[in-house]
Image: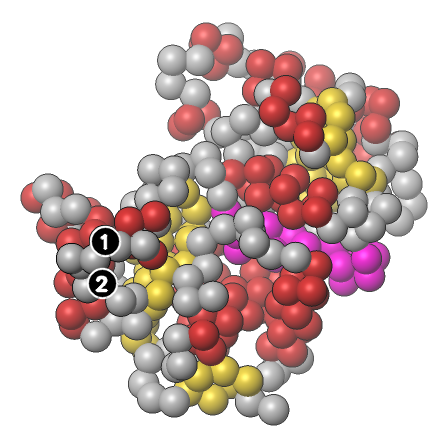
Amino acid sequence: MKHFVSVDNLDETKVLELIKRAQYFKNGGQINLNRAVYCVNMFFEDSTRTHTSFEMAERKLGLNVLSFDPKQSSVNKGETLYDTLLTMDALGVDLAVIRHAENEYYQELITPSADKTLDIGILNGGDGSGQHPSQCLLDLLTIYEEFGKFAGLKIAIVGDITNSRVAKSNMELLHRLGAKLFFSGPKYWYSEAFERYGEYRPLDELVAEIDVLMLLRVQHERHQGDQNELVFSPTKYHQEFGLTKERYQKLKADAIIMHPGPINRDVEFASELVESKKSRFKAQMQNGVFMRMAMLEQVLKDRGLGGENK
């Protein structure tokens, strides 16, 4: 894995290996680097958790982190993403974590044509409505620490599914690992294409039987041209598709609630429940640092830059 851009090729063995490495880092583990390693975080879409979490992970691993601000870069002069990365490569940057609005922006970066010389490790911090591998894997770490397994767990993914790269990565990998998936939320943000992974059911039919309730943010910024956005009501959404206090009371005693953030309080999630006993919102953010350390280590190892310290 000289790059880490999707969950497409991950099997149970690799997922569990990454989870174990994340737990190693969570317990204070470190790695050996073969030389000074330089990385840059290039976020062309707004981010708090992913951006800061990756930087924390990089610093904990002993990497040298270069600053990059798209608003002050030559991208604004028309420079392509490839040429920006070519500059980073020429300057000695080894790894780049990128978030970009374009789906699969990374393809020309990881499989350049024969006349191109780019050699820099790419980690995908989120591509459009495509994939979000690090969020998916930190979610799996959080679930595994709670239940010790994936097979047989009943997991509901609820909300703005069509526009969610988190939902797409999670449904693909959780299904592969044997979880039983359900979907809920507005039908206009649901596609029959998801039925290969699970079934759609009304939320009130699910809350009493699921092990994991995975809420999704309503992504208003991706709803341009969507007529449903013009009549969107936060209050109505919360009553129909959100975690209300009444639904919380119906959850199983050992069920957990997850959300990738940022949360629209009192829309997807009743505000007073965000830090409730069943909520794992804060745990997900904490686990994000350690899973991203594991992902970075994987790329470092496969590029011959460093790795396990044991």
Q: Is residue 306 above or below residue 174?
A: below
Does the segment drawn in magenta span residue 52? Answer: no
Residue 141, magenta (yes or no)? yes
Residue 113, disc: 1
Q: What element does badge 2 sit on?
A: loop
Query: Of the residues under marks 1 and 2, which one precedes in the sequence?
Result: 1
Q: Position of residue 27 (x, y in %)?
A: 66, 80
Three-letter code, disc 1: Ser
**Residue at figure coordinates x 61%, y 91% from the top left:** 310
Taking the image as shown, residue 85 lies to the left or right of residue 62, namely left
Q: Chief secondary structure of the magenta span?
A: helix
| Residue at 75% over, 26% down | 199
Where are the magenta residues, as a range? 132-149
Q: Quadrant of residue 20?
A: bottom right
Pair 1/2: label in front:
1
For the point 33% across and 80% down, the residue is: 37
**Residue 176 versus residue 244 in the image, above or below:** below
- Kind of residue at badge 2: Leu
Sort mark 2 into few (<14), some (14-19) or many (20+) by Cα contacts within 10 Å: many
| Along the viewing direction, whichever of 38 and 254 lies nearer the viewer | 38
Q: Name the residue that disc number 2 marks.
A: 118
**In the rendering, which numbered label is found on residue 212?**
none
- Examine the rendering and report whether any part of residue 278 can be seen: no
At 40% from the left edge and 28% from the top edge, which residue is drawn?
221
